[in-house]
C-alpha cells in the first residue's frame, strides 16, 4: 500500500527519504520515487520496481538541499510503471506531489484542466492534484493547497513542495493517515511512523482536513476555515527493534512465535479474577449504553472479518445478545437498519482499512454506536470509533496477519464476558473462563513446539495444488482463516468450508490429489466432524487433522495429526489456528515464495 515520507531540515534529504522508504517496504508497493529540492531546482527520480534499484540510481547522483518528498506506490490508477510512479510534477514542473488515497472526481477535474491547456503525462489521479495546486498558486504554497483541497473529492494524504519555495513542505490529509515528526529543527511527514522512527519519536497525528506547513523554523497546522489548530504531540513508545526481525528469517514466523506474548498482552491488566469480570478502560465512556445494548455487529475485512465471525460464536456462548459478523466491504453498501442501541464493533489491525472505516461511518450515520478493536494506536479507525480496546500486540509487519487474529479473539472474549456477566453468567462462570484465558499463553507455547512436525507435513504436501479446510461451529472461521493464510502466502488454491456443507457441493472435489485439513475439537459437534473426516477418507482424500491431545479416534482415521491442548470450545480457535499459520508459512517457504510481501498484497488497504 502506498507510503509517504517527506523531510525538511539539516540532514541529507536523499538519505532520510531512502531510509524512510525502505521502512515502508513492508506495506507492499510496486514503484517508488523521490523529489529533492536543492535550493534552486527540484530533481525527481522514480521508477517501477524495488527501492534497492532506486537507491542504486540515487547513489550515482549528487543531491544537496534540505527538502524532499518520497513515495512507495501500490497502483490504483494506471499500471505500475516509471511514469505513474510518484512524485508527480505539474505541467510546468513547479509543484511536486506524493499522494496516498484516491481522488474520486479526478476525471472531471482533469477535463477542466485540459481545457485550460494542461497536458498530462501519467494515468494517475495524483497528477491532477499537482496541476490543481499549480493553477491555484499565487505565491504561497499553503494557500494553493487549501484552495485545491476544496475542489477535490475522495481521500488523500499528500506531501507537496514548490520549486519557488525551497524552505516549505506542505502536508494535507483527508481520510488517509498523515503524521508530522519533530526533532530539533528537523521536520518529517509520513503516512507510517515506522519510516521516521530512527530520527524521532515525537509525532503529531494530523486529523482529517488538516493542512500542515513545515519550514526550518517550525510548523503550523490549519484546519477547515483556515483556523490555526493545536494537535497533541505524542511520544511513540514502541521501538524500532520491535519492528525488526530479531533473528527470524521472516516477520510472519516471528509474529507467529510472538503469539503467546500477544495473547498475554491482550489481557494484561484487564482481568479482575475475584469478581470474574474483565476490566476494559477503553469502553468506560460508552459503558452505560453498552451494558444495555441488545444487538452487536462485528465488522472487519479479511482476517479481521474471520476474527469477527469467530467472535460471533464467542458472543453466542457468553451473552444473550443478538450478534452478527459482517464483511465491512459488503456492509458499507447495504441498506442498514439498526435496533435501538446497537453497537458496531470494528476490528482492524492497521486501523486504516478503507472499507472498515467507510462501513463504520455509514453505521454511525444511521444511528449505530461505534467501538473499535484496533492494534495501531491513534489510527483512523481507533479515532473514528472514539472508544474501544487496543490489542497492544506491537507492530505486525508480515503482510499475512497472524498474531493480531489470536489477540482479536482474546479481546472479543473479554468483551463478551464483560457483557455476559451483566446478563446471566455467574461469578463461577466468570472466574472459570478468566482462569482458562490465563492458561492460553502457555498452551500456545505448547502448540508452537509442534513446529518441526508441521514443517515435515508441509514438506510432504506443499506440491498439492488444491486444498480444503473444514471446520464446524467455533472452528468454521478457523477453517476460513487457515485457507486464507495458505493461499495468500503460498499461492496454493485453498478453500475454507463449514464441514456440514460438504455434501452440498465440495465433496465432489475430493480425490487423492486434494488434501483436507480438518479442525476437530472435543466439543458438542465432535461426532459430526468425525463423520465429515470419514466422508473424505472413503473417497481416498488425504487428511491432516488438528485435534486435541490424545485423540486416538482421530489419529486412527487420518494421515497426519497435529495435536493441540484442550481448552473451552469457544476458545479453541485461538489454539487451533496456530498450526494452520505454521503450515501456510512452511508451504510458502518450500515453494520459495516472498512470504512477508506476497505478490499483489498490501499490509494496509487504505483504498477501496
Ligand atoms: C490477511 C490479511 C488481510 C487483513 C485485512 C484487514 O492475512 O492480513 O486480510 O486482515 O486486509 O486488515 P486490517 O485488520 O488492518 O483492517
Image: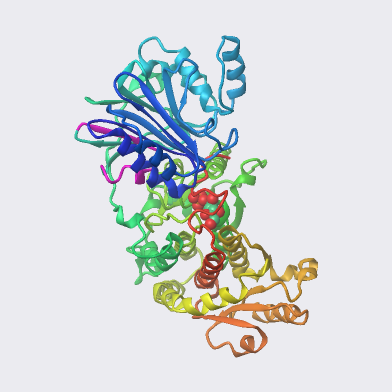
Residue 381, percent from left and from top: 46, 44
Residue 161: image quadrant is: top left
- Residue situated furthest front in the rendering: 60
Q: Is residue 467 above or below residue 93?
A: below
Q: Nearer the viewer, residue 564 or 461?
A: 461
Q: Residue at horizontal 29%, vertical 47%?
A: 236
Query: Magenta part of the protein: which range?
Result: 185-199
Q: Is residue 60 above or below residue 162?
A: below
Numbered disc total: 0
Q: Residue at horizontal 57%, vertical 48%?
A: 600
- Say if the magenta span includes residue 190: yes
Q: Is residue 204 visible?
A: no
- Say if the magenta span includes residue 561: no
Residue 223, percent from left and from top: 38, 24
Q: Would residue 344 appear left or right of 11 to someone viewing this image?
A: right
Q: Would residue 260 appear left or right of 345 to someone viewing this image?
A: left
Residue 242, percent from left and from top: 33, 57
Residue 113, percent from left and from top: 56, 14
Q: Is residue 313 visible?
A: yes
Q: Is residue 64 above or below residue 297?
A: above
Residue 550: image quadrant is: bottom right
Amino acid at each position: 500500500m502506498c507510503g509517504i515520507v517527506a523531510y525538511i531540515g539539516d540532514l541529507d534529504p536523499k538519505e532520510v527519504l531512502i531510509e524512510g522508504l525502505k521502512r515502508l517496504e513492508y506495506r507492499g508497493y510496486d514503484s517508488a520515487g523521490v523529489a529533492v529540492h536543492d535550493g534552486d531546482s527540484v530533481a525527481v527520480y522514480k521508477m517501477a520496481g524495488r527501492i534497492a534499484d532506486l537507491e542504486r540510481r540515487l547513489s550515482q547522483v549528487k543531491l544537496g538541499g534540505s527538502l524532499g518528498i518520497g513515495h512507495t506506490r501500490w497502483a490504483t490508477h494506471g499500471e505500475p510503471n516509471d511514469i505513474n510512479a510518484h512524485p508527480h510534477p505539474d505541467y510546468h514542473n513547479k509543484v511536486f506531489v506524493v499522494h496516498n488515497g484516491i481522488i474520486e472526481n479526478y476525471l472531471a477535474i482533469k477535463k477542466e484542466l485540459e481545457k485550460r491547456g494542461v497536458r498530462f503525462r501519467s494515468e494517475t489521479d495524483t497528477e491532477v492534484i499537482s496541476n490543481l495546486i499549480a493553477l491555484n498558486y499565487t505565491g504561497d504554497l499553503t494557500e494553493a493547497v487549501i484552495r485545491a483541497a476544496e475542489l477535490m473529492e475522495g481521500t488523500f494524504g499528500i506531501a507537496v513542495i514548490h520549486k519557488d519555495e525551497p524552505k516549505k513542505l506542505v502536508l494535507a490529509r483527508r481520510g488517509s493517515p498523515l503524521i508530522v515528526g519533530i526533532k530539533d529543527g528537523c521536520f518529517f511527514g509520513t503516512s507510517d511512523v515506522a519510516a521516521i522512527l530512527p530520527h524521532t519519536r515525537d509525532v503529531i497525528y494530523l486529523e482529517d482536513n488538516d493542512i500542515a506547513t513545515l519550514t526550518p523554523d517550525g510548523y503550523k497546522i490549519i484546519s477547515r476555515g483556515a483556523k490555526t489548530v493545536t494537535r497533541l504531540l505524542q511520544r511513540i513508545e514502541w521501538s524500532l527493534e520491535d519492528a525488526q526481525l530479531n533473528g527470524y528469517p521472516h516477520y510472519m514466523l516471528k509474529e507467529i512465535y510472538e503469539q503467546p506474548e500477544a495473547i498475554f498482552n491482550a489481557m494484561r491488566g484487564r482481568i479482575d479474577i475475584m469478581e470474574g469480570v474483565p476490566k476494559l478502560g477503553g469502553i468506560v465512556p460508552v459503558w452505560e449504553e453498552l451494558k444495555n445494548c441488545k444487538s452487536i455487529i462485528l465488522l472487519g475485512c479479511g482476517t479481521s472479518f474471520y476474527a469477527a465471525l469467530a467472535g460471533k460464536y464467542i458472543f453466542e456462548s457468553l451473552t444473550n445478545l443478538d450478534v452478527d459478523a459482517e464483511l465491512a466491504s459488503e456492509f458499507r453498501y447495504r441498506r442498514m437498519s439498526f435496533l435501538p442501541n446497537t453497537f458496531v464493533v470494528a476490528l482492524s489491525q492497521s486501523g486504516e482499512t478503507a472499507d472498515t472505516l467507510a462501513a463504520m461511518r455509514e453505521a454511525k450515520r444511521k444511528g449505530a454506536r461505534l467501538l473499535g478493536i484496533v492494534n495501531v494506536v491513534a489510527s483512523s479507525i481507533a479515532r473514528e470509533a472514539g472508544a474501544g480496546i487496543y490489542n497492544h500486540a506491537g507492530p505486525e509487519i508480515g503482510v499475512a496477519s497472524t498474531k493480531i487474529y489470536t489477540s482479536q479473539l482474546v479481546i472479543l472474549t473479554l468483551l463478551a464476558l464483560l457483557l455476559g456477566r451483566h446478563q446471566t453468567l455467574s461469578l463461577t462462570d466468570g472466574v472459570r473462563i478468566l482462569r482458562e484465558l490465563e492458561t492460553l499463553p502457555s498452551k500456545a507455547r505448547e502448540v508452537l513446539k509442534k513446529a518441526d512436525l508441521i514443517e515435515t507435513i508441509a514438506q510432504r504436501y506443499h506440491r498439492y495444488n488444491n486444498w480444503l479446510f473444514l471446520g464446524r461451529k467455533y472452528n468454521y472461521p478457523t477453517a476460513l482463516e487457515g485457507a486464507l493464510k495458505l493461499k495468500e502466502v503460498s499461492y496454493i488454491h485453498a478453500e475454507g468450508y463449514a464441514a456440514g456443507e460438504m455434501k452440498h457441493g465440495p465433496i465432489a472435489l475430493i480425490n487423492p490429489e486434494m488434501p483436507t485439513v480438518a479442525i476437530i475439537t472435543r466439543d458438542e459437534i465432535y461426532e459430526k466432524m468425525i463423520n465429515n473426516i470419514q466422508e473424505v477418507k472413503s473417497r481416498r482424500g488425504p487428511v491432516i487433522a488438528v485435534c486435541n491431545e490424545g485423540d486416538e479416534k482421530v489419529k486412527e482415521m487420518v494421515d497426519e495429526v497435529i495435536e493441540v491442548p484442550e481448552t473451552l470450545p469457544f476458545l479453541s480457535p485461538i489454539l487451533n489456528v496456530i498450526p494452520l499459520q505454521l503450515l501456510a508459512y512452511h508451504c510458502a517457504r518450500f515453494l520459495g515464495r516472498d512470504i512477508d510481501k506476497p505478490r499483489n498484497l498490501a499490509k494496509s488497504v487504505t483504498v477501496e
